[in-house]
Image: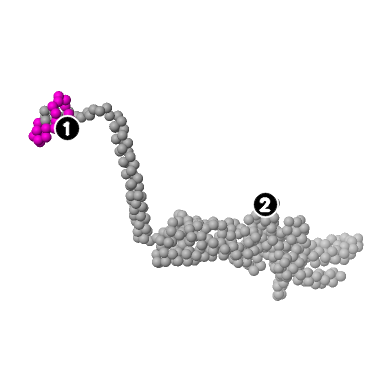
């Protein structure tokens, strides 16, 4: 009966083990729902790892076979029964010959992460589960959850070769950490010490460089789209490094990696196109139009790929070759001087009118205060005889005689 029970155990273990990837994988998905039943399903999934449920059945059958026999033997030969129990304890470890350890594997999903539980075998299109952080956000709750990765047996061929446990489901994690950078060529002004500036040409072929400030994020609703377009990171957990194809947890590529590579090159392309269509003076005068065109196309393109561009703008002034920059500065100063002179000439008639008004006001004030007498210095005063003498010499004789002094 014991031999038959062991043979039945191997058959049951084989069939349950064949179905365990699908059963355990589907049961694990319910962990991501906001129910206690999800955790209970996780415990149940452990019994379908190809060894759990058959072992429980085997132990129950062996107990039914041996307990009555041991009781009757113990009554007749207590020492023999005790020896058999001791030997049985040493033979229990023989079960490890057929499989390696099935350690419990639990993963914590953080509040800034979106997680997908995907059964690795069978029909897994509709059976996937998502950790719905939006529901927690709407309820003003903090999203976080610990989940368990179910395992199943992977049969291996060969003599004295152990079967190994592999994940029945895989947890895919998208980290929604926001991105903000200042891309410049100067190490002391940009976010990175590397040269991340943008180098373009104007329509005449004049070299121009500039810095860009940008910010982006992954919306919760766009997590799956982002994952589909940019894929999985090469980063794996420590226990998965030896067998990355059987990794229990995988992570989407970091947003910072995508922004500093793919998006950075796209910004370079768009800036080159916009500056290349314009002459140097137009590029200087139309910086707003250039950045608006870059922002509109960049936002539209990456919204379809799962990335939301929050803003983008110039982080530094437009830089030119030193000689061209000196010429631009000189032309600007000359224009400002010319504008200042033109402004003064335009205002000259007004200033002259104001001066004339002030002069007339001064004369009017002086006349209003005059008492009829002229007070002059003594060296400007002449006697009447001197005046008449001068008149006679000139042949005029215009001055009558008088004793008063008159002014010349």
Q: Position of residue 105 (x, y in %)?
A: 69, 60
Could you say which is closer to the camera, residue 4 or residue 350? 350
Horizontally, is 30 left or right of 269 in the view? right
Where does the magenta region start and end?
389-408
Q: Which residue is mark 2?
A: 142
| Residue occupying image coordinates x 71% and y 68% | 125
Q: Which mark is residue 205?
A: none
| Residue occupying image coordinates x 87% and y 66% | 65
Does residue 292 lie above or below 365 as drawn? Answer: below
Query: Callout 1 environment at 10 Å: few (<14), some (14 to 19), or many (20+)?
Result: few
Q: Position of residue 366 (x, y in %)?
A: 29, 32
Quadrant position of the C terminus in the picture? top left
Res 231 quadrant in image: bottom right
Res 397 quadrant in image: top left
**Residue lying at the far top of the rendered structure:** 403
Q: Which residue is mark 1?
A: 408
Taking the image as drawn, is residue 404 in sight?
A: yes
């Amino acid at each position: 009966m014991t031999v038959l029970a062991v043979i039945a155990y191997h058959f049951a273990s084989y069939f349950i083990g064949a179905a365990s990837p699908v059963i355990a994988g589907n049961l694990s998905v319910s962990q991501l729902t906001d129910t206690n039943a999800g955790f209970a399903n996780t415990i149940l999934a452990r019994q379908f790892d190809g060894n759990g449920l058959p072992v429980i059945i085997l132990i129950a059958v062996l107990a039914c076979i041996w307990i009555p026999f041991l009781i009757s033997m113990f009554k007749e030969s207590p020492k023999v029964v005790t020896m058999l129990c001791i030997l049985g304890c040493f033979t229990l470890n023989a079960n490890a010959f057929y499989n390696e350890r099935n350690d419990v594997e639990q993963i914590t999903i953080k509040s800034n992460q979106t997680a997908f539980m995907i059964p690795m075998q069978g029909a897994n299109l509709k059976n996937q589960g998502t950790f719905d952080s939006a529901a927690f956000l709407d309820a003003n709750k903090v999203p976080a959850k610990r989940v368990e990765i179910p395992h199943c047996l992977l049969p291996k061929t060969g003599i004295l070769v152990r079967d190994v446990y592999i994940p029945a489901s895989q947890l895919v994690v998208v980290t929604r950490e926001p991105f903000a950078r200042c891309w410049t060529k100067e190490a002391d002004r940009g976010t990175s010490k590397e040269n991340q500036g943008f180098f373009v040409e104007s329509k005449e072929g004049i070299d121009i460089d500039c810095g860009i400030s940008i910010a982006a994020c992954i919306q919760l609703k766009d997590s799956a789209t982002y994952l589909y377009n940019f894929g999985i990171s090469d980063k794996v957990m420590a226990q998965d490094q030896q067998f990355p194809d059987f990794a229990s947890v995988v992570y989407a590529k970091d947003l910072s990696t995508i922004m500093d590579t793919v998006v950075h090159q796209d910004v370079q392309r768009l800036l080159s196109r916009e500056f290349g269509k314009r002459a140097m003076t137009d590029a200087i005068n139309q910086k707003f139009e250039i950045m608006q065109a870059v922002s509109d196309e960049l936002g539209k393109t990456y919204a379809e790929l799962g990335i939301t561009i929050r803003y983008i703008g110039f982080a530094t002034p437009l830089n030119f070759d030193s000689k061209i920059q000196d010429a631009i500065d000189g032309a600007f100063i000359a224009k400002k001087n010319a504008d200042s002179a033109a402004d003064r000439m335009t205002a000259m008639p007004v200033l002259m009118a104001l001066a004339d008004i002030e002069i007339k006001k001064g004369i009017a004030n002086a006349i209003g205060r005059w008492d009829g007498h002229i007070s002059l210095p003594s060296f400007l005063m002449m006697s009447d005889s001197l005046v008449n003498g001068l008149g006679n010499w000139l042949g005029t004789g215009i001055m009558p005689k008088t004793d008063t002094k008159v002014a010349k």
